[in-house]
Amino acid sequence: MDASTGQELWSSRLATSANATPMTYRSPVSGRQFVVVTEGGRPAYGTKPGTRLVAFALPAEQR
């Protein structure tokens, strides 16, 4: 979301469920902002097994 307008800039679906609250950070070198979340599934819930850390960022020209 754009902090000044509230406009949605991007959205995506995860391969499995999110297991934690997303975290955001800004690179001190490039100034680029990233959103990171862990995802993972459980076969008992009908989702793919495994856990991974996924990071997202808008293309550099959209900052």
Image (cartoon, rainbow, N blue to C red):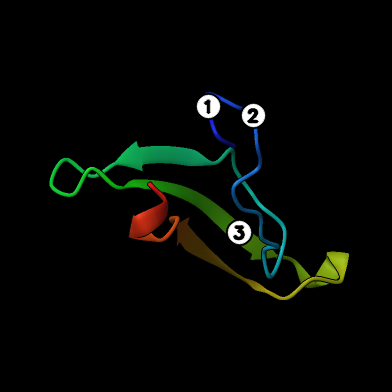
Which badge, 3 or 2, comes first in the chain's sequence?
Answer: 2
Q: Which quarter of the figure has residue 12?
A: bottom right
Q: Quadrant of the N terminus?
A: top right
Q: Which tag, 3 or 1, sits closer to the chain's start?
A: 1
Q: Secondary structure at mark 2?
A: loop
Depth order, front residue of 28/18? 28
When the figure is inspected, residue 60 is found, relative to residue 23, above or below; the finding is: below
Of badges 3 and 1, nearer the viewer stands 1
- At a point 23% along the width and 44% down the height, the residue shown is 27
Nearer mark to the viewer, of 3 and 2: 2
Q: Position of residue 25 (x, y in %)?
A: 34, 39
- Give neighbour class at mark 2: few <14, some 14-19, many 20+ (Cα, 10 Å): few
56 and 43: which is toward the camera: 56
Q: Residue at x 42, y 39 (%)?
A: 24
Per the rendering, the mark at residue 3 is 1
Question: Which label belongs to residue 6?
Answer: 2
Q: Position of residue 47 (x, y in %)?
A: 79, 71
Q: How many marks?
A: 3
Q: Amino acid at mark 1?
A: Ala
Is disc 1 placed on a helix, strand or loop?
Answer: loop
Q: Dot 3 surroundings within 10 Å: few (below 14), some, or many (20 or more)?
A: some
Mark 3 sits on what residue? Answer: 39
Left/right placement of residue 27 relative to residue 48 reads left
Relative vertical location of residue 38 with respect to residue 25 in this rendering, above or below: below
